Amino acid sequence: MSPGPYAGIGLALLAATAYNVGVILEKRALGQMPALDVRRVVHVVASLLTDPAWLAGFALMLTGLACQVVVLTFEPVSVVQPVLASGVALLLVLSRLVLRERLGRTETWCVAAMAAALVMLALSASTGSAAGHHASAGAMAAVMIPSAVIGLLVAGRPVRAPAGQRRTRAISFGIGTGLLYGVSALAIKALSGILVRHQGIASLVAGIVSSPYLYVLAGCSAAGMLLFQAGLQSCRASIMVPVSSVSGSVYFMIAGTWLFHERLPANADKLGLRLAAIVVAGLVLVTLARQDGADPAGTAAAPAARHARTRLPDPERQSWP
C-alpha cells in the first residue's frame, strides 16, 4: 500500500534538509583545505576522504540521496523534485547563519519564493498521483548522454577561466553540476523501479548490479561531486549551490516526467498550483544567476598568500575562524 501524498512530501523534505545541511558542513571543511585542483583527481579524493569534517557533511548528503531513492518509489517526479529544490531556501538561511554569507534583498525574496512553491506543491498533492518506474532505454540514453557531456563541458569551464570572472565561474559550476546531478537523478529514478519489481535481497542486489543505471549514477555523481567541491570551495555557497540545485531540479522534473510517462494532476486547480511551483523554480534560477555579479557586503577577502596557491582564485573566499 502506498503512503499518502503528505508522507512523500515529508520524506522529500527530510532528503532536502539532510542534503543541504551536508553541503554547509562540506563548505566549512573546504575552507580549511588547500585549493582543490580537479585535474589531480587522486590527490583531491585523498584530501577529501581524510578530512573528518568533510566526511560528516558527505555522510549527511548521502542520507539525503538515500531518502530521495525511497520517496521516488511511490511519488511522481513532478511532486518530489520541487520539494527537493525547496532546500535552496534552507541553504540560503544556513549560509548566512553558519558561513556568514550575507543575504541581499533579492536572495531573501528567493527564500520566500521557494517557501511559497513548497506550499503550492503540498496543496497540489493528490492520492491519484502515480509514480512511473519504466522508461525506454533508447529514450533514456538519448537524453542522458548529451546532458552528461554538456554538463562536463560547462562545469569544466571555470578550471580554465581567467581570474576575476565571478559570474562565469559560479554560474558555470552551478549549471554544469546541476546537469550532472540531474542525470544522476534520472538514474536514481530508474533504479527505484528495481525496488518495486524485485522481491528478496538476492534478487534486488542482482537487479541493481546488472543495471546500467547504477554505473551511470556512479560516473555522473563522481564527476559532479569533484566539480561541485571545487566550485563550493571557490564560490559563494549561497549563489553556486542554488543555481546547481534549481537547474538540476528543473531538468530532472521536465525530463523525468516525460521519460517515465507520469501524468500531471487532472484537477485544474492542482495542476495550476504545480505548474506555478515549477515556474517559481525556474525564476529563482534566473534571479540568482543575475545576482552573482554583485559582491555582497560582509564577505571577507581571503589572505593574499592563499590566493597565490589557489588554482581557482576568488576574492569571495571566506576565512573561517
Image: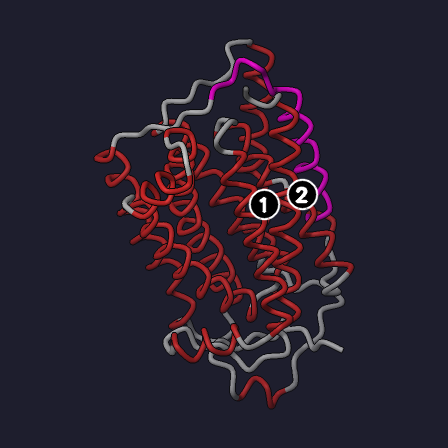
| Residue 318 vertical placement versus 24 (above, below) | below
- Residue at 58 percent of width and 50 percent of height: 63
Sort mark 2 into few (<14), some (14-19) or many (20+) by Cα contacts within 10 Å.
Answer: many
Secondary structure mostly seen in the magenta stretch: helix
Where residue 226 appears, as percent x and y from the top left, is: 44, 66
Q: Does the magenta stretch include residue 204?
A: no
Q: Is residue 127 magenta?
A: yes
Residue with the most extreme left position: 138
* SS label for mark 2: helix
- Residue at 66 percent of width and 33 percent of height: 10
- In the picture, the disc for residue 299 is none
Say which label, 2 or 1, has the lower sequence index.
2
From the viewer's perspective, is 157 left or right of 68? left
Between the C-alphas of marks 2 and 1, the distance is 8 Å
| Residue 146 vertical placement versus 162 (above, below) | above
Tally of numbered discs = 2
Going by the numbered disc 1, the residue's amino acid type is Thr
Provide the residue span drawn in magenta: 107-130
Quadrant placement of the C terminus: bottom right
Residue denoted by label 2: 110
Residue denoted by label 1: 287
Where residue 192 appears, as percent x and y from the top left, is: 42, 36
Q: In which quarter of the view is residue 252 placed?
A: top left
Q: Which of marks 2 and 1 is in front?
A: 2
Where residue 255 appears, as percent x and y from the top left, is: 38, 34
Closer to us: 214 or 233: 214
- Residue at 63 percent of width and 31 percent of height: 9
Asked whether disc 2 touches disc 1, contact meaning CB atoms under 8 Å apart, the reply is yes
Going by the numbered disc 2, the residue's amino acid type is Cys
From the viewer's perspective, is 224 left or right of 128? left
| Residue 310 vertical placement versus 105 (above, below) | below
